[in-house]
Image (cartoon, helix red, strand yellow):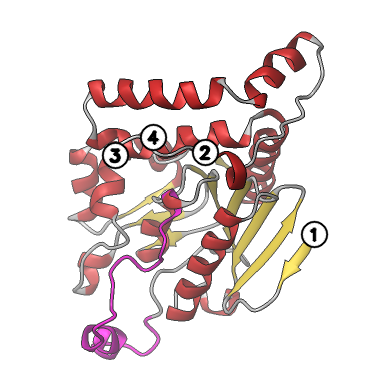
Amino acid sequence: MTREPGYEDLRVEIRDGIALLTLDRPDHGNAFTGAMGRSLGRAYRECDRRDDVRVVVLTGAGRIFSSGADVEAGGAATFASQEESRSFSAAAVDPPAWEVRKPVIAAVNGSAVGLGFTLILQADLRVLAREGKYGVLQVARGVMPDAYSHWTLPRLVGTERAADLMLTGRKIGGDEAERMGLASRVVPASDVLPTALEIARGIVESTAPVSVAVSKKLLWESSALSWVDVGRKETALHVHLMSRPDAVEGPVAFLERRKPRWTMTLTEDWPSWPA
C-alpha cells in the first residue's frame, strides 16, 4: 500500500483501487483539528480526481474513531478562534464526503461522538463497532450539531429519531445505532476495518466506476427532487451510459462467467449532468 505524503493528522494510503484514510491522532482520541479537516478535504478532492481510486474507506487510528472537536484548550477558548475568523465554517470538511464521486465507507472502529459522529453521516455506508458509543453531543457542550447533520441525519433515520439524538445530546451503543438504521453493518470492533475493506473490494471488482459515480450523485440529490425530476435524470444518464463500452462489457462478462474489464473512467466519460 502506497502512503501519500504531506497530510497532517491524517494518513492516506492507496492500493488496489482503495484509498484508506485514517484519522491519525490516536493519543488524543483522534480529536478533530483544523489541520485534520484541511487534510481530509484535500484527500477527498484527490480521491475524486484520481481514476486509480475506486472506493474511499475512512477510519481512525487506535481504539477510537473520533472523540469530536479538539476541546483540550477548554471552555470558550475551544471555539473562540473559529468564531472570530471570517473563514469559519460549521461544515468542518470541504468537500463533504457525498461530493466525492466514489463510494465513501466509514469504518468506525470505535466510539464516534460530536463532530466525529456528524462526520460519518456524510459517508455512503457505515460499518460501526458494536462496542462503540455514538452521539451528537454538541448541545451538551453549549454549541450545536454541525457538518450538515441537520440534513444528513434525518435522511438516514427520519426527523423524530434525529431529534431524539440531536436535541438530547445522549449517547447510544452499537445495537441501538443498528436498530435506528445508522449503519449498513454493526460488527465487533476488530472486524470493522476488514468488513469495510471487503465491501470496498467487492465494489472495485464487480462494479463499473462511472455507473457507480452517477448513481451515487443522483442518490444524494434525490431527496430534493420530485419523482418526475428523478425519472428525467435517470433517463438522461441511462442514455449516456448505454452508448459506451462498459454497457457492452458488463453483459458480455456475465455471459462469459468472468470478471468484467471496465475501460470507462470519470476523467474521460463523466456525463454533462442533467439540470
**Mark found first going from the N terminus, 4 or 3:** 3
Helix, strand or loop status at disc 3? helix
Q: In the rendered view, would you say 189 is above or below 271?
A: below
Residue at image position (48%, 66%) is 41
What residue range appears in magenta? 71-98
Q: Position of residue 53 (x, y in %)?
A: 66, 50
Residue at image position (28%, 89%) is 81
Which residue position holds label 4? 218
Observer-nearest of 55 and 137: 55
Q: Is residue 217 left or right of residue 18?
A: left
Which residue position holds label 3? 155
Q: Residue flagged by tag 1: what amino acid is it?
A: Met
**Mark found first going from the N terminus, 2 or 3:** 3
Q: Residue flagged by tag 2: what amino acid is it?
A: Ala
The mark total stands at 4
Q: Residue flagged by tag 3: what amino acid is it?
A: Arg
Which residue position holds label 2? 213
Is residue 268 one of those drawn in magenta?
Answer: no
Q: Residue flagged by tag 4: what amino acid is it?
A: Leu
> Contact (CB < 8 A) between labels 1 and 3?
no
